[in-house]
Amino acid sequence: MIRIIDPKVALAGWPALANRLRQASFCAALAAVAAGPAWAANAGAVGATIKSDRIEVGYRDAAKLTEFNRSAGDRDDWVDALSKYTLTQAEVVLPAGQKLSITITDVQRAGRYEPGRRPAAADIRVVRESTPPRIDLSFRIESAQGAVLKEGERQLRDSNFMNRARHRGETLGYEKNLIDDWLRMDVRAAKR
């Protein structure tokens, strides 16, 4: 797991950074440092808000997400990956001159880690039709002048998630489908 961080924050939190770098390959660590502050996040905070010039993505309280109650252990590497993916995709669909703020309020990833499996299989996420992905969020789209163009709360669901090919086999693939669909329907459709 790598979190891309602001180098200024890294110096202040060197022990935390050093631990993360030990876990990552040397090349991946170099890529994280080279990326610089474009994906600025706090070094020690899971689910820290990330920003670009026009978009901000954060969590209401990442530690209280339903997914953490469903999963044992410290499986939190997906939190920052989901917000980074959301920001990247929003950059593509958000019309020029608009700003977007997204607060993810809850997440239940597709599938679950099932108790009682032998130790070698304890980290395998089992996905069934009965465990669909769910993401709750609130958002606000503003014009360049600051006028609110669209805002609201959404509960993203897909009961047909196992039959969709986009992002299949990728980490967070089912959740990425939810984000893509929402961005296409709500953000790309926002009027000036």
Image (cartoon, rainbow, N blue to C red):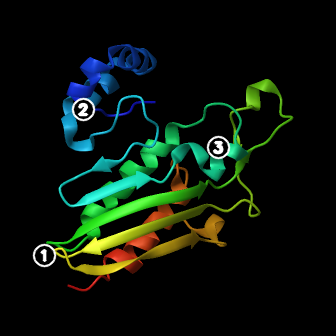
The one nearer the camera, 36 or 16, is 16
In front: label 3 or label 1: 1
Q: Amino acid at mark 3?
A: Phe
Q: What SS does tag 1 mark?
A: loop
Give the residue at mark 1: 145
Could one spot residue 55 in this view of the protein?
Answer: yes
138 with respect to 132 (left or right)? left
Find disc 2 in the rendering and name its residue. 6
- Which residue corresponds to the image point at 25% horizontal and 70% vertical from the top-left? 94
Is residue 126 in view? no
Mark 2 or mark 1: which comes first in sequence? 2
- Vertical placement of residue 92 versus 88, above or below: below
Q: Which residue is mark 3?
A: 68
| Quadrant that contains the C terminus | bottom left
Q: Position of residue 59 (x, y in %)?
A: 46, 52
**Residue 143 location, quadrant:** bottom left
